[in-house]
Image: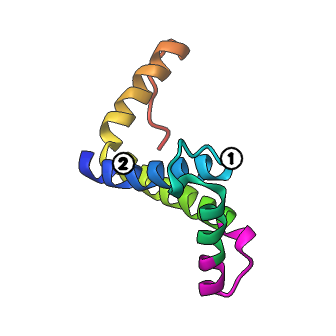
Amino acid sequence: MRYVLALWALPLILFWGWFGLSFYNINFGYVMLTRQVHDLVFQLYGDTLGIDPTIIPGMVAKACIIDTLIVLAIYAFRRRRQIGAWLKTQRERYLGEPSSPSA
């Protein structure tokens, strides 16, 4: 699961790091981080997809959010016993009595 999380996070960090630096034209002398390349890349994506290039960052953000929710759901499913035990101890700590099953 550690590798899955790393393979999920690395592209997000790279893309949003590039996007933020190139959007604000913080290029450190590196051509790939200039605003001109930023605009060119999104113009190419927009032409390829046949959509307005200005809506692409929002679409990518929505896709990243959905992807993040899916990865977190898989992680929570794999750790459901540990999460359940943690919730039980938290409930007992703050409510002062052990929970009893209602069914």
Which of pointers 1 and 2 lies earlier in the amino acid sequence?
Answer: 1
User: Regarding mark 2 in the picture, which secondary structure is present there?
Assistant: helix
Looking at this view, is 89 or 30 the one in front?
30
- Horizontally, residue 83 falls left or right of residue 2, namely right
* Vertical relation: 48 (above or below) 103: below
Looking at this view, is 48 or 4 the one in front?
48
Residue 63 position within the rendered picture, expressed as x and y whole percent measured from the top left: 56, 64
Q: Which residues are magenta?
A: 44-56
Q: Which mark is residue 24?
A: 1
Q: Which residue type does callout 1 highlight?
A: Tyr
Q: Main secondary structure of the magenta part?
A: helix
Residue 38 position within the rendered picture, expressed as x and y whole percent measured from the top left: 62, 62
Would you call the spot at circle 2 few (<14 residues within 10 Å), some (14-19), or many (20 or more)? some
Instruction: Check if residue 49 falls in the magenta segment.
Output: yes
**Label 2 belongs to which residue?**
75
User: Regarding mark 1 in the picture, which secondary structure is present there?
Assistant: loop
Instruction: Check if residue 41 falls in the magenta segment.
Output: no
* Vertical relation: 38 (above or below) 10: below
Residue 57 position within the rendered picture, expressed as x and y whole percent measured from the top left: 66, 63
